[in-house]
Image: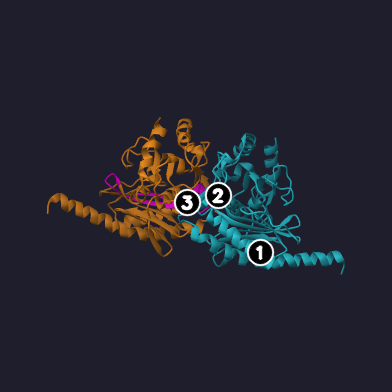
Chain colours: A orange, B cyan
Amino acid sequence: MTQINRDSLNREQNIQDRSNFLSHLAHAAKASVMPYFRNQIEIENKAPDSHMFDPVTLADKACETVLREAINSQYPADGILGEEYSQTDAHSPFTWVIDPIDGTRAFMSGLPTWGILIGLICEDTPQLGMVIQPFTGETYVGGMGKSALWHKENMTYLSTRACSELKKATLFTTDPSLFNEQQRQAFEKVETKVRLSRYGCDCYAYAMLASGYVDLVIEPDLKPYDILPIVPIIESAGGTVVTWDKEPLRLKGHNSVNVVAVGDKSLLEPVLNLLQG
Amino acid sequence: MTQINRDSLNREQNIQDRSNFLSHLAHAAKASVMPYFRNQIEIENKAPDSHMFDPVTLADKACETVLREAINSQYPADGILGEEYSQTDAHSPFTWVIDPIDGTRAFMSGLPTWGILIGLICEDTPQLGMVIQPFTGETYVGGMGKSALWHKENMTYLSTRACSELKKATLFTTDPSLFNEQQRQAFEKVETKVRLSRYGCDCYAYAMLASGYVDLVIEPDLKPYDILPIVPIIESAGGTVVTWDKEPLRLKGHNSVNVVAVGDKSLLEPVLNLLQG
């Protein structure tokens, strides 16, 4: 057996180990968050000087703390990049990427469309991803060529749906006010061509795309923890997710990027042409 | 006992009877809809000549049919006004108002923010209302001074929250593209003054308002079946819902109206002043 094959097998085994560990993380994350959901919670504004209200709650902080402790305890050499606390550098090829509550605005409004995002990066590439929605009892998980939804005790494999024409597509974005003027003009070029355009949903829109109910998600200025955990779920379900410049989503050098996800890959070129045109 | 007292007692009894019947309707409605949710369904456009895609599915039709049959069988003299089929005139003081799927666009996108709406009108006034979200297992029900959420087997009473300042309020509307230019300008006067404004959600936003997680919902051009079933849930939870001209929501003469719902009644005047100003 060559060295390269052995390294590659080791890598596979290391990812598989961490994949098994995801269900433990999911359990811990849900338990930390749910006491705060639909309960009176203190809400802090992370960006008091901006016109955008950017809330953070005790639930975000509690969840990220619990996940960091669990990861540190099991894989102390792995890096951690989370939304709420400073980065832990990696002394292994692996970095965990965490958004403890993606959709804090939905969370504080009682809606079931937020999610806990946990992703595993190997070197620079997203390998595993999970979106947990504890109120509905859904966990979307993807990587290593398979994506699945666990809904309570039932598991179903996910696949994106065929939709090769923009005029038949359903498009989602979280909030049109998150676009700057140039981004908004680009977005509207696509929006005017689709059958149905809807706002809201944060990570839940990507889960619906991986499940084959939505064809297109377009969002501006996503941070690594907003999108990297979602990449393996979409890709292993048959879709693709890239920047508006058609760059793949990687950890290094990723501060914030404009993202487009498609369920049917044949939609990508026409959408990118509109966004760039 | 005077005649007036006797009539009033009879009326109360008749409403109570129908209130008990609601759980039967909820059960029938859920069973008719859920086989279609997150399943491949045919989608028809009700307004092919409009720029707005107005979908209707077999699920909408199946649900309204089941509810009409159940009501006709139990209360044959009662009227029925539903979204999908023509009106059944009342030969009693009672009319049932049905939106089989409020939020068909959310339904067809796999989201859990649509609902089945069933309301009971006595003469002209909304008396009972129900919002059913079968995927999450939630049923919001209100009338006769009490509003409650049944979540699976658990019941909790609902009350709206205090929020007397617009700058602390969370505002919802389903879709900004539903406003015409004049309505949009009015809406934006309010939107620029609140802490958080969010899009999406249809009936679910009103359920969140009745539950005390959202302060304000503003929508244009609602039909009777879109809003009358929601009125008793909000009012019995402590909030209020009126037209932008501060008219109460009644069945007669209600083709389509602009609606504002507040959890804290002290928000009503400042909001109406902005909408009318």
Q: Say whether disc 2 or disc 1 marks the residue closer to the N-terminus.
A: 1
Residue found at x 46% / y 43%: A168
Decide: marks 3, 1 in contact (CB < 8 A)?
A: no
**Residues tagged by mark 2 and mark 3 found on one chain of the structure:** no
Q: Is residue B128 left or right of residue B139?
A: right
Q: Which residue is mark 1?
A: B71
Residue most extreme to the left: A1
Q: What SS does tag 1 mark?
A: helix
User: Residue A133 appears in which quarter of the rendering?
Assistant: bottom left
Viewport quadrant of the N terminus of chain B: bottom right
Magenta stretch bounds: A97-125
Please provide percent x and percent y for residue A233: 36, 51
Q: Are marks 2 and 1 in contact (CB under 8 Å)?
A: no
| Amino acid at pointer 3 | Trp
How would you rate the neighbour count of disc 2 (Cα within 10 Å): few for under 14, some for 14-19, many for 20 or more?
many
| The stretch drawn in magenta includes residue A100 | yes
* Chain for numbered disc 1: B
Disc on res. B201: 2
Foreground mark, 2 or 1?
1
Left or right of residue A120, residue B28 in this image: right
The disc label shown at residue A114, or none: 3
Q: Farthest residue toward the bottom?
A: B1
